[in-house]
Image (cartoon, grey):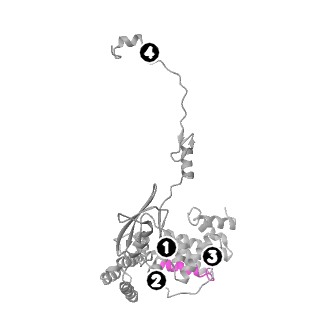
Amino acid sequence: MGFWHVSYMEHHEDLFFEVLEEEPVPTVYACPQCAATFDTHELLRDHQFEGHPIRKPALLFRGMPIGKLGIKVVRPTEIEDWQVVDASIAFFDGRSVEVDAVGCLLSQASDGIYEVELVDGPGRWIATIDVAVPAAEDLEACDAAFGSMMASHELSLQAVQRFVDDTRRLSTVSGYRDGIATYLQGVVLREGLGGSWVEKSEYRNLYERSHALLAPYDRHLATSICSLVSFHFNDFSAARRLSSSLRVSWAAERFERLLASDRSHPSWGEEGRFSLDVAITDDDLEAILAWTCSAGSITSPQLLSRMEEAHGRIEKLDRTKVGILVAEAYLKSGDPARGVPYARDLVHDHLAGSWASDYLDLVGAV
């Protein structure tokens, strides 16, 4: 008789539904890599993280690790420029190679995009290396075309387009040319010369794209633009590192010190080669650079009035810099209370919040 027959079940329920009292068996979490055991998964996870860290392979270019997005190489390289770290297996464009051969292969690579994969146990690293070394004569011709545009004293979208058209034949410098043109388009928008068809705030995207395009190039124009873009976005460390301009470097270091509540002035070094920053800054950035470097006269009523007027109208990133300058000018002039509103405006700013709090404490403001 099957168990699904009710009449049998009714008389033998105890055989089917007896509850057995058993002691619960504790769960033990064992490490798969050693004999250690743990009472909780969290303890096992901590043990694996600290006791058995996964070695992550990496590829360094001139001492700097390359991210997963890869890099663009625009200059000839030597074997010593490339270093493989913590890898036992390597693949170059899908084929297995000796780990020590990666640097040699990359230094000898012609223009093209290459995939490098490094493996060590469970650790794996993959990225693309874009090799695009421009011809020296194309770089010179592109710089000359920019010089001609600068000499024309015309800044407009039409002028930028003429620069692009004049350099289109220079096939090996497309990234360099596009980086310059993109920055100039951003300046056009910042100056309000872009017309009503595009939002002025779009300049931010143009500045960021320009920086990305020009960062690989060790050219005076490229580093000048990248330095100014970094300064605009308040990355003062990068601005100082990249700039060959004495005043941009000085202004960047001045802000670095102020943000650390250090009110001492940097020392003036010696100007290197001709500084391009004067020729390629937008009006607001040019004014901020001039004010920052006017340490001796920054407390003059006329200059303070111009800075306060600018603070009320300019874009947020620049307003941070101007707010610090105005407050510091009032502090230096002996009237720190007038700088309090500018400090309070920056108390919650991720960059200047510490400076603002220190300023308020210094002047005894609540």
296 in magenta: yes
Query: Which numbered tag is attached to residue 15?
Result: 4
Task: Count neighbours of disc 1 (C-alpha within 10 A) and say few if under 14, some if 14 to 19, many if 20 or more.
Answer: few
Q: CA distance from mark 3 to mark 4?
A: 92 Å
Q: CA distance from mark 2 to mark 3?
A: 33 Å
Q: Compare residues 204 and 62 and report the one nearer the observer.
A: 62
Q: CA distance from mark 3 to mark 1?
A: 42 Å
Residue hosting label 2: 220
Residue hosting label 1: 62
Q: Are marks 3 and 1 in contact (CB under 8 Å)?
A: no
**Is residue 153 positioned above or below 91 on the image?**
below
Q: Earlier in the sequence, mark 2 or mark 3?
A: 2
Amino acid tagged 4: Leu
Can residue 237 be seen from the camera position used here?
A: yes
Residue hosting label 3: 329
* SS for callout 1: loop
**Is residue 151 positioned above or below 28 on the image?**
below
Amino acid tagged 3: Ala
Q: CA distance from mark 1 to mark 4?
A: 77 Å
State the predominant SS element of the stretch in magenta. Answer: helix
Select label 2 or label 1 by which is in front: 1
* SS for callout 4: helix
Q: Are marks 1 and 4 in contact (CB under 8 Å)?
A: no
Select label 3 or label 1 by which is in front: 1
* SS for callout 3: helix
Select label 2 or label 3 by which is in front: 2
205 in magenta: no
The quadrant the N terminus occupies is: top left
Amino acid tagged 2: His
The quadrant the C terminus occupies is: bottom right
- Magenta region, residue range: 277-298
